[in-house]
Amino acid sequence: MSETPLLEIHDLAVSFPGSEGAAQRVHAGAWVNLTIYPRQTLALVGESGSGKSVSALSTLRLIPTPPGRYDGGRILWRSSADAPTVDLLSLDEKRMRHVRGNDIAMIFQEPMTSLNPVYTIGDQILEAILLHQKVPRREAVQIAIKALNDVGIADATRRMDEYPHQLSGGMRQRVMIAMALSCQPKLLLADEPTTALDVTIQAQILELLRSLQHEHDMAVLLITHDLGVVAENADVVAVMYAGRIVEYASVFDLFERPRHPYTRGLLASIPTLGGRARRLPTVVDGATIPEDFPDQFTVRPHEPVESSGARAADPDERLHEIEPQHWVLCKHRSGDASKATRPDLPYRRPVATASPA
């Protein structure tokens, strides 16, 4: 298994005009750093509006510019261990179109708004295949049918001629996955892929993504606010708040020893079955600073953006490796910013194997 990262995001900054116009910029992503390895699932977690989707859309350069703007950083892509590294932010639109769908694909949380209602399922999958693969249409049809079969859609030949409104929500999401995987991408960006589905279909879709990931040796950036989904599926977790990555660790380390106040509050706010309470806990209720936080670092208490204003994006705070392979957004007491390091964690959880009968 390759230990060369597929994707490295370095200090990505993305902004949009504020309510006062061009003179004011709102940073939807600030100093974002991520590293994704082959066959790894990196979960990007946080509340709605924290900047998760903006970070993913930036990877494919899908942020409209204007009004959006890339203010800094690099997005380094390497399609294989021996391939040259390219900065996706430096590519022209023609070269970027080759990357989209071919090397990096994306599925969205609501397939009904992503699928075109006036084209058949087959036409929409074939468009992606014919755009990126130099194959005749007859072969493209077979690739599309196989893709639908791979995601568990029965009678795929007939489904090719149907329209999105004729399918259930779970089947539409499977079609989106088939479309994304039809060109065998190295990285799949899954933006809330199960939000609009009931829990039974959610489990089926997530199991499908896991099996396809191992079958195709593919990396997944899983964007979600569902910590149960994260615990079951992620290898590495990046917690995001107000456009910043506040904590970065393996899934087991993060759940066992959350170190940033926001992460602790997020985990503490999960309701428990069988518990009785007059009021459900909020993120602020559980956002405490660990008593054993390393002495050489200082971390701010968590304050919601509404009350903290500009302090939500303190440029002096950077990701520091406060414990082996565990990064937290904080400051070094020495004030030496050079002690900050980029998160880089090639961890994959052991693959469960079936016990012998």
Image: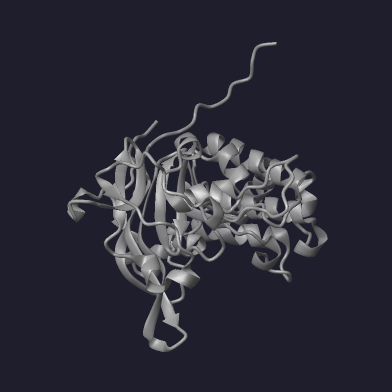
Quarter assignment of residue 108: bottom right
- Which of these two is toward me, 351 or 105? 351
- Identify the residue at horizontal 59%, vertical 21% (top origin): 353
Instruction: Please name the residue shown 53% across and 50% down the image.
Output: 286
Residue 179 spot, x, y in % from top left: 61, 54
Residue 222 at least partly seen:
no
From the viewer's perspective, is residue 293 above or below residue 195?
A: above
Q: Nearer the viewer, residue 203 or 167?
A: 203
Q: Nearer the viewer, residue 200 or 25?
A: 25
Query: In the image, is 307 to the left or to the right of 329?
Result: right
- Give the vertical position of 139 relative to 122 (above or below): above
Residue 293 location, quadrant: top left
Left/right placement of residue 217 relative to residue 6 reads right
- Nearer to the camera, 56 or 294: 294
Residue 82 in picture, x, y percent from top left: 30, 41
Residue 133, given in percent of the width and then of the height, sits at 51, 54
Q: Could you tell me residue 27's position as x and y percent? A: 40, 71
If the image is split into quadrants, where does the C terminus sit?
Answer: top right
Q: How many marks?
A: 0
Residue at screen point 49% across, 72% down: 306
On the question of residue 278 being in view, the answer is: yes
The figure's colour scheme reads one colour
**Is 50 displayed left or right of 116 in the figure?**
left
Residue drawn at (46%, 40%) of the image: 254
Residue that protrudes farthest toward the right in the picture: 166
Q: Quadrant of the N terminus?
A: top left
